Amino acid sequence: MDNPRRTFFKAAGATFLGAAAVSRAGAALLPEAAQQTSPATLPPSPPPNGRPFQPLVTLNGWSLPWRMKAGVKEFHLVAEPVVREIAPGMKANLWGYNGASPGPTIEAVEGDRIRIFVTNKLPEVTSVHWHGILLPSGMDGVMGLTQPPIAVGKTFVYEFQLQRSGTFMYHPHADEMVQMAMGMMGLFIVHPKDPRQHRVDRDYGFILNAYDIEPGAATPRVNTMTDFNLWTWNSRAFPGIDPFVARTGERVRIRVGNLTMTNHPIHMHGPHFEVTGTDGGWVPRSARWPEVTTDIAVGQMRAFEFDALAGDWAIHCHKSHHTMNAMGHGVPTMIGVEQHDLVRRIHELVPDYMVMGDRGMHDMAEMEMPLPDNTLPMMTGQGPFGPIAMGGMFSVVKVRDDLARGDWRDPGWYRHPAGTLASELSSEYTAELPPESRAGAPAADAATVQVRKPHGHTGH
Ligand SMILES: [Cu+2]
């Protein structure tokens, strides 16, 4: 990613302006629009100028560089078609900003005066609404109501002063259904003026989004109202979503905005968290309570914080069909249905026919089914103990005692301390069980058995 200062000189240099021309022509010059097409999570770097703040880590994303011009922070967004890798093995044709969907995170500080140039390289008109930010009505970006459309090929400029810190978003307010279904959105973080306020050790952010992409296709169906089939965080589906890493004891904040067409109860295993920020800013300390799931409605933003505990902790949407990738919802429930004779007869006609679902759907996680090109398996991801069998809105909070401060790399899988790992009861102990509990199914009262003969397994 370009340093904003360097970006400025590159932009100015490209026009070969003489010193005398800079004052007038320079005032109209657009800042260079930085591009980033990689879905990697970029580690944060401290702001090169302006008020200090602790930068956000955008999950599978990045933050937009700016330049300072006479005390104003200038950003340049380019609305354009992009190709986004949803997860390894699948790319989607989306619309976004500056090379990616979602667009880069805009980060600034309470009190900053900012100027945002928006260039439209889409095949149709657009506008940008600064979702949740207090600003003059005429800067609100609602096509027809507060501004004319940004025509194809044209650039608009928005300028306002940031009055309140918090977690906000940006997205079009022109042909919204199509443009948001195509992935046009981004985070907008306003940091507190005093960097000691609301201080955390690690600050993560992502947007909940969803697509309807037919298996084998690459372009979303834009008229879908509710029946989306790819549930994503920052336009990534598990196992394409990076983990949230932290060191034991660190204070971690995760900020989430919802621009899908349904609510998502975001559930985190392990440490309890508190919602510390909502759509309008910060929640007073006296109004916070511990919880493990927070429901995020359409159009809402939530920031929650916790003290990191060592382990690998799942974090996911608790609607279980949102932790799966594209599938056919029309599949009948086959649990308990004996299909084998039927399968034998179908095989005579359709040699590739596969039986599924007669013992639940777990087999789907292990089988190698032929999939159309550019299609993600429905339930996938490999963990240290076998298939994780998830997709969509799922990731892992990875907390380690020995992670260095400022180290953002994936530390691998957790090494469980001796005596802290669930394991199968060995045959030595099952021999003591009444015969009806021995075969196959887990013991009805396994807890009692374990209390009587505790296991001494020590992990891996
Ligand atoms: Cu969900």
Image (spheres, rainbow, N blue to C red):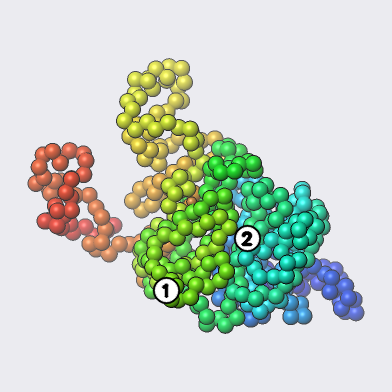
Query: Residue 257 or 431: which is nearer the viewer?
Result: 257
| Mark 2–mark 1 distance (CA, rounded to whole Å) | 27 Å
Q: Amino acid at mark 1?
A: Glu
Q: Is residue 50 left or right of residue 372?
A: right
Disc 1 residue lies near ligand 1 with CB under 8 A: no
In the image, residue 59 sits, relative to residue 438, either above or below, namely: below
Does the rendering let one see residue 208?
A: yes
Please give left or right for residue 369 compared with residue 74 in the image: left
**Quadrant of the drawing holding the C terminus:** bottom left
Q: Residue at x 65, y 43 (%)?
A: 222
Residue 322 percent across, percent down from the top left: 47, 48
- According to the picture, the residue beneath numbered tag 1 turns out to be 250
Q: Position of residue 158 (x, y in %)?
A: 75, 67
Residue 288: image x %, image y %?
A: 43, 71
Compared with 63, 233 (above or below) is above
Please tell me which residue lies in front, 32 or 451: 451
Asked if residue 86 shows in the view, the reply is: no
Q: Position of residue 103 (x, y in %)?
A: 65, 59
Q: Where does the N terminus fall, quadrant-wise?
A: bottom right
Going 84% across and 74% down the picture, which residue do you hit? 27
Query: Which residue bears the numbered disc 2?
Result: 186
Q: Residue at x 80, y 67 (%)?
A: 30
Q: Secondary structure at mark 1?
A: loop
